[in-house]
Image: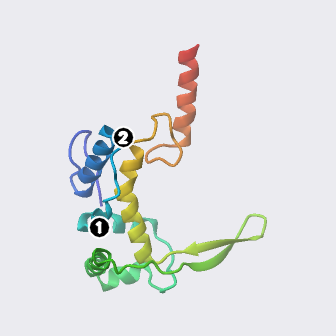
Amino acid sequence: MTRHARKGQPHPLDPSRPRQHKLFQAAKRSRNRRCHARYDRIFRPDILWRAWRAVRAHGGSAGVDGVWIEDVEHQGVAAFLQVLAQDLRGGNYRPPSVRRVSMPKPDGRPRPRGISTVRARVVQEAGTIVIEPLFAAHCQDTSYGFRLKRRAPQAVQGVKEQRVSNG
């Protein structure tokens, strides 16, 4: 469980947050900074634990391997993440195919969905944790689409404020 720290203070329970902030600051300082060498951060224990907590919070079904989040918890999350980190570090990780299911749309037509394995979701979330600050650093302040802690109502409020300031 994470708590939010006061602004400017390190996050009390999550050591990955200060590292994420450093990546953001470095990317913000240098627009042309090359950020291709970030793979080594994906398999860091703090990043994988944070990714696990996010995947756990989202829930979801089992993928093609039939493994549920509860199965991972029953067998041991620490061991699961350790094996995953070893596979990532060694270059042996390969994402499996997704489980295809159909969900009905409101009009009754089927909507095809792909469900990743729990393992793949943890890796995807870890990748997001590492690269998100690099991309966020180059977004304009007026950009709200698909950004962390940005919502449509904030965009609408920003437009209203811009209209008022422009007369």
Amino acid bearing label 1? Trp
Mark in front: 1 vs 2: 2
Q: Is residue 154 above or below residue 19?
A: above
Q: Position of residue 28 (x, y in %)?
A: 33, 40
For numbered disc 1, what is the local secondary structure? helix
Q: Is residue 14 visible?
A: no
Which label was assigned to residue 49? 1
What residue is drawn where x is 25% and y is 46%?
Answer: 5
Q: CA distance from mark 1 to mark 2?
A: 30 Å
Amino acid bearing label 2? Arg
Residue 69 picture quarter: bottom left
What residue is drawn where x is 33% and y is 84%?
Answer: 74
Q: Which residue is mark 2?
A: 31
For numbered disc 2, what is the local secondary structure? loop
Q: Is residue 139 above or below residue 56?
A: above
User: Upstream in the sequence, badge 1 or badge 2?
Assistant: 2
Q: Is residue 109 above or below residue 143?
A: below
Residue 127 picture quarter: bottom left
Q: Residues within 10 Å of mark 1 (few under 14, many from 20)?
A: some
Which corner quadrant holds the C terminus? top right
As drawn, the residue found furthest toward the top would be 167
Q: Position of residue 7 (x, y in %)?
A: 26, 39
Q: Is residue 16 visible?
A: yes
Q: Position of residue 25 (x, y in %)?
A: 29, 42
Residue placed most toward the observer, 70 or 45: 45
